[in-house]
Image: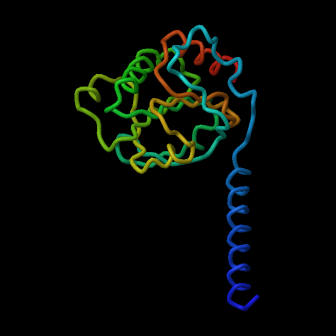
Amino acid sequence: MDKKTIVILIVSILFLVGAIGVYFFVNSTVKIDDNVGKEFVLPEEEPSNTKDLDNITYVDFSFENNEGNLVKLSESKDKATMILFWNPDNKDSVDVLKKIDSMNENYEKINFYMINTAEDMPKELEDSLTIDVYYDNLNEGVSKFYITEQPAMIYIQKNNEVLHAKTGLTTTDALEANFDILSENF
């Protein structure tokens, strides 16, 4: 073999080893837990278009409140937390947001973060809500939690363990069951 062939072979091997290393590093940071969410919601209460999100682990990220101040998810460590990633252009997202908005006063033990992933929100929708809306304009939370569909809900215990994560439109009964479990047991 000539020197050029040997150099190309060595560079190819190094590239392959690097790619394998990156693959294992990325996948080693994702906690795999087959038991997450198995008994969290009664299946008959969920519509068929909902989907459990597997391998979701807690990550800290920042988002803005209505005044433009940054809020860190880690600041809510003393309470159970429910995050809704939603977009005003998605009808299912708005429907879930309105359901949560109508029930949030009953669940004082839970931090609710209704995180709008769009840059703005229609004024009439904003005026109709009683719950605070937060903004993740850079989609930091969406990317850190690997959210590919909206609405997406993540239920987090006080110890920052993700209890359950799912996407899709949900029923009021299922939301209430989830909130009861989150607020009473955690």
x, y percentage for residue 55? 67, 37
In the image: residue 54, left or right of residue 171 = right
Q: Residue at x 53, y 46 (%)?
A: 72
Total numbered labels: 0
x, y percentage for residue 5? 70, 85
Q: Quadrant of the C terminus?
A: top right
x, y percentage for residue 13? 73, 73
In the image: residue 82, left or right of residue 77 = left
x, y percentage for residue 107? 54, 18
**Observer-nearest residue: 105 or 93?**
93
Q: Quadrant of residue 67?
A: top left
Which residue extends farthest bottom?
Answer: 3
* 150 relative to 171, above or below: below
**Observer-nearest residue: 144 or 105?**
144
Q: Quadrant of the N terminus?
A: bottom right
Q: Quadrant of residue 162?
A: top right
* 125 relative to 45, above or below: below
> What is the basis of the colouring in this image?
rainbow
Q: Residue at x 64, y 28 (%)?
A: 164
In the image: residue 60, left or right of residue 85 = right
Q: Residue at x 46, y 46 (%)?
A: 63
**Observer-nearest residue: 145 or 58?**
145
In the image: residue 88, left or right of residue 42 = left
Q: Residue at x 71, y 17 (%)?
A: 39
